[in-house]
Amino acid sequence: MFGCIVSGRLVQTDAQQVGPTQFVFNLADVERIHHVIVFLTGVTPFPDGMGGGVYYCYPTPEGPTSQLLGFIGNNKPSAIFKLAKVSYYERLQNPFALNAGMALDQVGAQIGISIEPLDQLAQQTPASHTTPSNLNSYVEYTQKMLENFFNFASSFAITQGQMTPNPSESFVPLSVVQKWYENYQRKMTNDPNFWKR
């Protein structure tokens, strides 16, 4: 039902059910996690009036703690969240029933999804600095722009047999454009702000 992507990593669809309405994704190498995407896979929708509260659960010296990141639902099937450490007052008691085999010190951290009524989810306030990122619209725009450029350039593709000699014209192999497109997509996936450097 759920998927999770940590920026720069493969998709995870291995959520473990830890309660009747609670699921967790285990995350390793916590220090290198900055953004996470949580989404519905489209296989099973939420029941009417229900959604999924998204929590970031991580170890602290005082014990496991959580912070509310936001929520997803049938009308909002995905969200990108920026993860940040929160103040002591914004921490929640861990809402997920972790058993000894899933202690956070063994798995690193977790993204938890708790199925709850949408009206309750809409009233909850995510921890500061963890609200859904606006990178989604920027990344989507950039990907659409790249696809448009690639489709435009490839529409002029001709074979070597179709070429007529023209000393004033330069030709770029379509494979070079495709390689640039794939490299740019990879960079956007790993770090949407890479172009600012």
Image: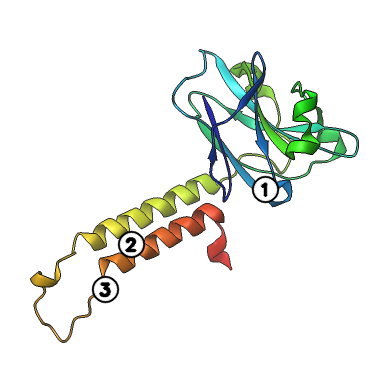
**Image check: 78 left or right of 56?**
left
User: Which residue has dot 2 on it?
Assistant: 178
Label 2 CA crowd tier, 10 Å (few <14, some 14–19, many 20+): some
Q: Residue at x 26, y 70 (%)?
A: 173
Q: Whole-percent x and y of residue 124?
A: 70, 25
Q: Whole-percent x and y of residue 159?
A: 14, 67
The quarter holding residue 86 reads top right
Snapshot colouring: rainbow
User: Badges 2 and 3: C-beta atoms under 8 Å apart?
Assistant: no
User: Which residue has dot 1 on it?
Assistant: 33
Q: Whole-percent x and y of residue 15?
A: 60, 28
Of all residues, the one furthest to the right in this rendering is 62
User: Which residue has dot 3 on it?
Assistant: 172
Q: Is residue 77 visible?
A: yes
User: How far is mark 3 from mark 1, CA to CA?
Assistant: 38 Å
**Image check: 176 left or right of 11?**
left
Q: Secondary structure at mark 2?
A: helix
Upstream in sequence: badge 2 or badge 3: 3
Q: Is residue 58 visible?
A: no
Residue 14 higher or lower than 114, as above or below = below
Name the amino acid type tagged 1: Ile
Residue 62 higher or lower than 53, as above or below = below
**Image check: 5 left or right of 26?**
left
Q: Secondary structure at mark 3?
A: loop
Q: Residue at x 58, y 68 (%)?
A: 197
Residue 96 higher or lower than 137, as above or below = above
Label 1 CA crowd tier, 10 Å (few <14, some 14–19, many 20+): some
Upstream in sequence: badge 2 or badge 1: 1
